[in-house]
Image: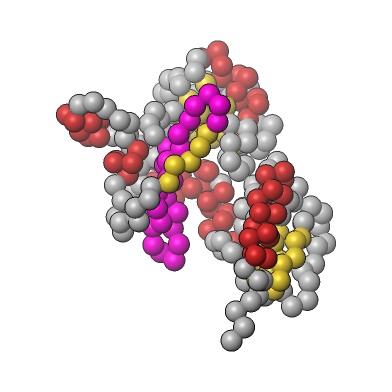
Amino acid sequence: MNDKLNIVVMLGGASAEREVSLRSGAAVAKALRSLGHTVGELDPRTPGWTLPPGTDVVFLALHGTYGEDGTVQKQLDALGVPYTGCGAAASRIAFDKVLTKQSCIEKFVPTAKFVTVNSSSSPFPENFHPPLVVKPARQGSSVGLQFVERMEDWPGALAESLKFDSEVLVEEKIIGREATVGILDGQPLRWSRCARNKAATITITNTRPARRSISARRILAPRRRSGSRRRRSARSGRWAGVTTRGWM
């Protein structure tokens, strides 16, 4: 049986993350070729792209709008060509931060208190206090993300974030350690946390395989010297921002 595939890596595109996608896509193509696969690269920067005849699968290395929001997934579904990553419906929900948070509330998953804004003239949200995080509802990575540490930061942060989308998500800022857990075929992968310093942001991956059930409290709660303080912090819900707009 021939296990070598004819793979097309889609990279680049027209989103704000084009340059990152070009680099990651080139790295993916290089790795796939080293495994003996036949690999082509396709940049869908303009409409009207076509896949080469005989394409077995598409490896999606696109970032941001079009590549992660369900658009290209829907097009590939129509062509009947398999591709990597989630399907069109899941991609659309996951890329839209507001839809994601609404899904979390429906499933009783703790999420930070939030409100949506769509005008640069909107006043500071009621029942909120700095610090806040302001971000476009539909952009990838940290594109357009702004921090509001003081009330006077609000107008500039809102105007900047609205440059990247017509709707902005405003959340209370949760102080803690940032972590991520990937899911593959229904199984949790090793969890990773981000360590930040003045020079760079690096990802530290846990070398132990993840258990089927991972304690979000253990991963996300800030380090404290006192165990009793950690327990009190966990009970208060501040580790993950239990209060949400949907539960108020």
Asked if residue 95 is positioned above or below residue 83 in the image, the reply reads above
Quarter of the image holding residue 110?
A: top left
Q: Where is residue 101 in the image (x, y as percent from the top left)?
A: 46, 44
Please give the name of the residue rendered at 41% of the width and 56% of the height, measured from the top-left corner.
189
Query: Looking at the rendering, in which quadrant would you find the C terminus?
Result: top left
Q: Nearer the viewer, residue 185 or 97?
A: 185
Is residue 6 depicted above or below 234 in this figure?
below
- Measuring from the top left, give residue 79's x and y in whole percent: 70, 72
Count of numbered tags: 0
Q: Which residue lies furthest to the top in this view?
A: 152
Q: Main secondary structure of the magenta part?
A: strand
Residue 107, x across and y down, in percent = 36, 52
Q: Where is residue 128 in the image (x, y as percent from the top left)?
A: 43, 23
Q: Is residue 239 left or right of residue 166?
A: left
Residues 180 and 125: in front is: 180
Say left or right for 204 vs 66.
left
> What residue is drawn where x is 38% and y is 47%?
206
Q: Magenta stretch: give its range.
A: 178-200
Q: Nearer the viewer, residue 80 or 141?
A: 141
Location of the N terminus by quadrant is bottom right
User: Can residue 245 be seen?
Assistant: no
Q: Which residue is drawn at 23% across and 26% down?
A: 225
Comparing 170 with 33, the one in front is 33
* In the image, residue 195 lies in the stretch drawn in magenta: yes
Residue 40 visible in the displayed image: yes
Q: Which residue lies furthest to the bottom in this view?
A: 1
Residue 17 position by quadrant = top right
Q: Quadrant of residue 223?
A: top left
**Residue most toward the left?**
228
